Image: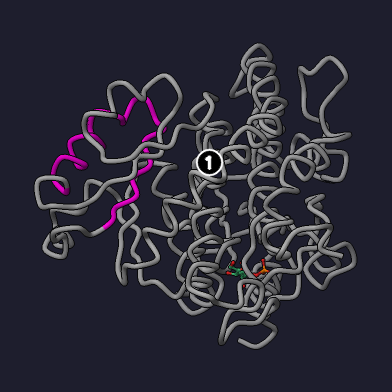
């Protein structure tokens, strides 16, 4: 059932190109110029009435939501707040009938996420679910449901479900943008074209897995490391850090690159590994200056960078991993893949049970 792979996690990492294609399938018009989300029952008037969006989820699904916030705000120009589901209800959030609440859950059974969904409905908000499981509690109780077509995810560490959630957010963002007229059809067609290239681009990253295995084996000798990035790179950094923690048991922290000097820089010492994401062209100079801050204090930096920028980044980092070029908003669907592989190989190098990490369950049905 692992189809020749040593672990479900590795199999699921390699299934991502298919998961992307399946999640896009049937949701893009034949001419590639518009997104068709027939599963969304909201009328154009109802969509125009949305004043704000709350994205609520746990763990990795929350990290997809962090990217989702940037995607929806930039495409649909609707303000978005994100909350982890275990915090949401207890901060008395301002949920009004013109709020769209988006819950994200692979399993569709996470207790806190389900409770958040019920609270949102009680307050009169419309709830849209992004879930991987047809017939799950979340899918049954939400008003609208986008099913991610990742297929069953067995490994406790989520990989293809996360990236399929990103695809769902891109589709939703484009759909809302089209309805609201916040983006023109040429722009939408450009994003759709770039999305169609993602599966092959992931394949080319997977072809370089041996490089990442080597990186991970070196990292596995450390007990502490950092992930840094800005914008969506920071969101991906948080997911990379969680993935590494949960299966390799190596402590890591994800920091917004510009925040380091406000405290955490004190932890940087000789030899500490720092994984830096540098995929956003407009932020790239700024992130490079943060890399210089950690390098000056002895950090060993791996830069995850867009193809084409290697030359300029190379002088500032110790190691480079290049990902194929895509639109800035889409880069999380590529840049997370090397981080998944690093987590996998670090766990393997440490002799851990990759698919069933200690203390964790695949579906958390208690609050
Ligand atoms: C991490 C992981 C968890 C889940 C979280 C939410 O790899 O898998 O953080 O993402 O427990 O689960 P779902 O998406 O099923 O609600």
Colouring style:
one colour
- The quadrant of the image that shows the C terminus is bottom right
Ligand 1 image position (quadrant): bottom right
Taking 34 as reference, is 132 above or below it? below
Q: Position of residue 169 (x, y in %)?
A: 65, 43
Residue 278 seen in the current view: yes
| Apparent side of residue 69 relative to residue 7 in the rendered image (left or right) | left
Near mark 1 (Cα within 10 A), the count class, few <14, some 14-19 or many ≥20, is many
Residue 68 seen in the current view: no
| Apparent side of residue 40 relative to residue 242 in the rendered image (left or right) | right
Q: Which of 199/115 is in front?
A: 199
Which structural element holds mark 1? helix
Q: Label 1, on which residue?
A: 332
Q: Which of 131/179 is in front?
A: 131
| Apparent side of residue 266 relative to residue 355 in the rendered image (left or right) | left
Q: Which of 235/54 is in front?
A: 235
- The quadrant of the image that shows the N terminus is bottom right
The quarter holding residue 141 reads: bottom right
What range is drawn magenta here? Answer: 273-294
Label 1 CB less than 8 angstroms from ligand 1 = no
> Is 46 one of the magenta-colored residues?
no
The quarter holding residue 155 reads: bottom right
């Amino acid at each position: 059932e692992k189809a020749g792979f040593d672990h479900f996690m590795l199999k699921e990492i390699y299934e991502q190109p298919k998961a992307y294609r399946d999640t896009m399938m049937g949701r893009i018009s034949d001419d590639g110029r518009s997104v068709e989300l027939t599963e969304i029952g909201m009328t154009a008037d109802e969509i125009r009435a949305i004043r704000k969006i709350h994205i609520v989820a746990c763990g990795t699904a929350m990290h997809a939501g962090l990217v989702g916030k940037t995607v929806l705000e930039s495409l649909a120009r609707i303000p978005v707040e994100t909350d982890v589901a275990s915090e949401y209800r207890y901060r008395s959030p301002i949920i009004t009938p013109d709020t769209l609440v988006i819950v994200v859950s692979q399993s569709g059974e996470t207790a806190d996420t389900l409770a958040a969904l019920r609270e949102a409905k009680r307050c009169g908000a419309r709830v849209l679910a992004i879930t991987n499981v047809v017939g799950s509690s979340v899918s049954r109780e939400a008003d609208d449901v986008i099913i991610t077509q990742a297929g069953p995810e067995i490994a406790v560490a989520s990989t293809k479900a996360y990236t399929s959630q990103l695809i769902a957010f891109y589709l939703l963002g484009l759909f809302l943008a089209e309805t609201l007229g916040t983006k023109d059809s040429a722009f939408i067609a450009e994003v759709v074209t770039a999305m169609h290239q993602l599966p092959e681009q992931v394949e080319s990253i997977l072809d370089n897995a041996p490089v990442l295995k080597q990186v991970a084996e070196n990292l596995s000798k450390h007990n502490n490391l950092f992930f840094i990035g800005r914008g969506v790179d920071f969101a991906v950094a948080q997911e990379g850090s969680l993935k590494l923690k949960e299966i390799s048991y190596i402590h890591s922290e994800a920091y917004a690159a510009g925040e380091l000097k406000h405290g955490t820089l004190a932890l940087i010492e000789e030899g500490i590994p720092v994984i830096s994401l540098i995929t956003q062209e407009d932020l790239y100079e700024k992130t490079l200056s943060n890399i210089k801050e950690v390098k000056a204090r002895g950090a060993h930096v791996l830069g995850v960078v867009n193809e084409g920028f290697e030359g300029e980044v190379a002088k500032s980092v110790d190691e480079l991993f290049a990902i194929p070029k895509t639109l800035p908003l889409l880069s999380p669907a590529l840049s997370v893949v090397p981080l998944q592989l690093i987590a996998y190989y670090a766990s393997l190098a440490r002799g851990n049970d990759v698919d069933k990490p200690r203390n964790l369950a695949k579906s958390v049905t208690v609050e």
